[in-house]
Image (tube, rainbow, N blue to C red):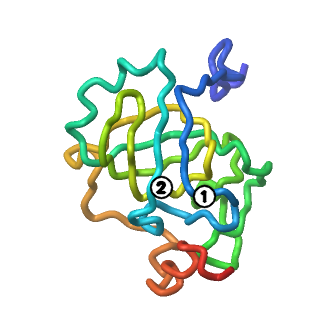
Amino acid sequence: MDEHAPGPGLDELRLKPIGVIRSEHLGLRTTPIQPVCAEGRPGRVVVFSEYAAGLTDIEGYSHLHLLYWLHRAEPGSLMVTPFLEDVEHGVFATRAPMRPNPIGLSVVRLVERQGSVLLVEDVDVVDGTPLLDIKPYVARFDVREDTRGGWTDGVDAETFDRRGARRDG
């Protein structure tokens, strides 16, 4: 028995969407790459009614982590060429959407709650994306000092801004 294998029943997981993310982004090639490149871009997080009670007290947070299923991502490989460079890196050293499990993560600004709908900004997600979970962004938990950005530390700001906002075409 492989000591590193998942436990019984964990070789395949089942996820159920809790809602859907609505945005102005209709095409994969025109959607900003990261929330920082989508500053001010609006969206709505529509939480299904059976999960609406879970939004209680969310208004106290300025930002939220959205976890979602990259439903339009194509199957990937373990080596990918990320948007910031023209050389390959291991998929786990990138935020490329083509992954073994296409789970996306974005930090968005919470503008307002309207019942089971959250109005948000800084949305870098394609319209209609299935929402898997919402977690509050808490600086006390999430901010780390003295971090390294790996190969991304070598990318100049102009390249990051241009490619991240999809201004290359």
What amino acid is labelled 2 in the image? Val
Task: Say what secondary structure mark 1 lies in.
Answer: loop
Residue 134: image location, x then y, percent: 42, 35
Q: Which residue is mark 1?
A: 25
Q: In the picture, residue 36 is in which quadrant?
A: bottom left
Determine whether label 2 and label 1 are within 8 Å by CB: yes
Residue displayed at 54% across by 73% down? 165
Residue 122: image location, x then y, percent: 42, 59
Residue displayed at 55% across by 35% down? 131
Q: In the picture, residue 6 is in which quadrant?
A: top right
Residue 31: image location, x then y, percent: 61, 63
Q: Is residue 122 left or right of residue 141?
A: right
Which image quarter is the C terminus in?
Answer: bottom right
- Disc 1: CA contacts within 10 A as few (<14), some (14-19) or many (>=20): some
Q: Is residue 55 left or right of residue 22?
A: left
Spot the residue most to the front. Answer: 114
Vertical arrangement, residue 87 with respect to residue 132, above or below: below
Q: Nearer the viewer, residue 85 or 115?
A: 115
Q: Is residue 17 left or right of residue 115?
A: right
- Disc 2: CA contacts within 10 A as few (<14), some (14-19) or many (>=20): many
Q: Nearer the viewer, residue 54 or 22?
A: 22
Residue displayed at 27% across by 55% down? 144
Q: Nearer the viewer, residue 9 or 127?
A: 127
Image mark count: 2
Mark 2 or mark 1: name the one nearer the start of the chain: 1
Task: Say what secondary structure mark 2 lies in.
Answer: loop
Residue displayed at 60% across by 54% down? 92
Disc sitting over residue 123 in the figure: 2
Marks 2 and 1, how far apart at CA: 9 Å
Which image quarter is the N terminus in?
Answer: top right
